[in-house]
Image: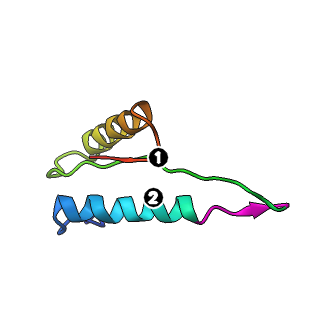
Amino acid sequence: MRFFFADTDKNEVVKRLESFRHFIELNSPEFNQQKIKFTLSIGYVHQPVYQIDELLKQADIKLYEAKETGRNKVSA
């Protein structure tokens, strides 16, 4: 199984995810001349994959950690 960031250093992945999060925040759409602000919380886990269910569970925990500590952030 191949994942998008499989061969990338954890710090580089967090940097890219943070850049993507920032892009979403800055490029929120306009609707009837009102800007709708979008934010993004991301949970990222950097570990060997033995079971996909466990990896998704760990990423979900990181996602909720990001939400509980202020939202609009990357938690790794």
Of the image marks 2 and 1, the number of the one nearer the N terminus: 2
**Where, by quadrant of the figure, is residue 75 drawn?**
top left
Q: Is residue 29 left or right of residue 12?
A: right
Give SS at disc 1. Answer: loop
- In the rendered image, residue 45, in percent from the top left (x then y), is placed at 25, 48
Give left or right: position of 67 versus 8: right
- Crowding at label 2, few (<14), some or many (≥20) Cα neighbours within 10 Å? some
Tell me which residue sits at (36%, 60%) in the image.
17
Name the residue that disc number 1 marks. Answer: 72
Alpha carbons under labels 2 and 1: distance apart: 7 Å
Above or below: residue 23 compared with residue 76: below
Residue with the most extreme top position = 68
Residue drawn at 54 percent across, 58 percent down: 25
Residue 53 relative to residue 29: left or right: left
Left of 20 or right of it: where is 10?
left
Q: Is residue 1 visible?
A: no
Report if the CB atoms under discs 2 and 1 are less than 8 Å apart: yes
Q: Could you tell me which quadrant the N terminus lies in? A: bottom left
Residue at 28% x, 58% y: name it.
Answer: 14
Mark 1: amino acid: Asn
- Quick one: label 1, few (<14), some, or many (20+) residues within 10 Å? some
- Give the residue type at disc 2: Arg
- Decide if residue 67 is in sight here: yes
* Residue 36 percent location from the top left of the image: 70, 54
Colouring convention used in this rendered image of the protein: rainbow
- State how many labels appear: 2
Q: Which residue lies under the disc numbered 2? A: 21
In this view of the protein, which residue sits in the foreground, 24 or 35? 35
Quarter holding residue 11 = bottom left
Q: Looking at the image, which is closer to me, 13 or 61?
A: 13
Read off the magenta span: 27-32
